[in-house]
Amino acid sequence: MFTREWVRAVTVMMFTLAPMGVGAEVPWQFADNTRYMAMGDSLASGYGAVPATQGYAYLLYQEGVFDKIPNTLLSNVGLIGATSADVLNYQVPLAINPYVPTVITLTVGGNDIASILTGADPATVLMNFQTNLSAIFTQLRTGLPNAKIYINNLYDIPELPIPPPGIRPIVQAFNQIIEGVAGVFNVPVADVFSAFEGRKGLRLIQRNGADQFEVHPSNAGHRAIAKAFKAVIENN
């Protein structure tokens, strides 16, 4: 049997808590948060870093480059093996709906280059890459007109066992496309190529006993990529 005192106490508590429930934001409402999406290939996913959460996209988040950590939502859709066509066909739709990011970083092109190294026609791959990258930016700019977008260029890997002049001319051709297409869509480019140029310890292939075709960055390499992104983000 409830006493009169118990009913009175519960009634007071309900009226005391009611204003808090009305004014408080429920935890699944994130309208005011910075929504960061990392798009692209294995580099975006953190591959090569140990643990993967030391990859460049996670470093940008952890260092609060876009916003304070409590106010930043991170969605990393980077996928090992993703080509520019994969980004266009599968990742861009996820960005436009349902995530709707306010800021995007994109790393793409490495797996397109890999197809050349396994026998694909360079001219065809380069043309398709330019077409895909243009379509990626077109759809992002159309579907997310207020989003800030950043892309990085690609680094050279002189240690790859490829006859002279090595992979450098291919990387440079891809970087020219990245610079050109990004310029059309007003997308700042993080200069990862220069960040890696002439430096040791940034590529896993430089380690003793590494696979001769290990192209991914080390932890130090991911830090260099994050630093390159941070520099261009802070200036734009």
Image (tube, rainbow, N blue to C red):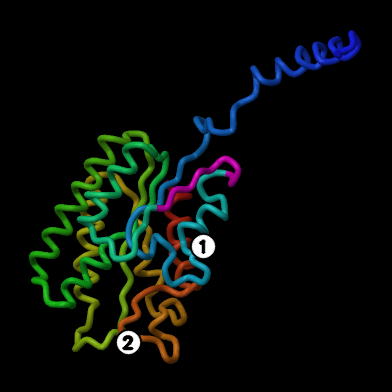
Q: Which residue is mark 1?
A: 53
Label disc, if present, on residue 126 of the rendered structure: none
Quarter of the image where one finds residue 172: bottom left
Given residues 93 and 233, the one toward you in this image is 93
Asked if the residues shown at circle 1 and circle 2 are in contact, with their CB atoms under 8 angstroms apart, the answer is no
* As drawn, 185 above or below 24: below
Point out the tag, 1 or 2, that comes first from the N-terminus.
1
Which residue appears at 31% of the width and 75% of the height? 156
Could you say whether the residue bearing mark 1 is in a helix, strand or loop?
A: helix
In the rendered structure, find residue 212 and report the number of the disc placed on it.
2
- Give the percent coordinates (x, y) of residue 13: 80, 17
The picture places residue 70, in percent across and down from the top left corner, at 60, 43
In terms of image quadrants, where is residue 128? Answer: bottom left
Residue at coordinates 87% horizontally, 14% vertically from top-left? 6
Q: Residue at x 43, y 79 (%)?
A: 199
Residue 78 lies, with reference to residue 4, above or below; the image says below
The residue stretch that appears in magenta = 68-76
Query: Which image quarter is the N terminus in?
Result: top right
Label 2: state its secondary structure. Answer: loop
Whole-number angstrom distance, CA of label 1 to CA of label 2: 25 Å
Camera-side residue: 168 or 209? 209
Q: Is residue 156 left or right of residue 3?
A: left
Q: Amino acid at mark 1?
A: Thr
Q: Residue at x 38, y 58 (%)?
A: 190
Residue 14 in the image: x percent, y percent?
76, 15
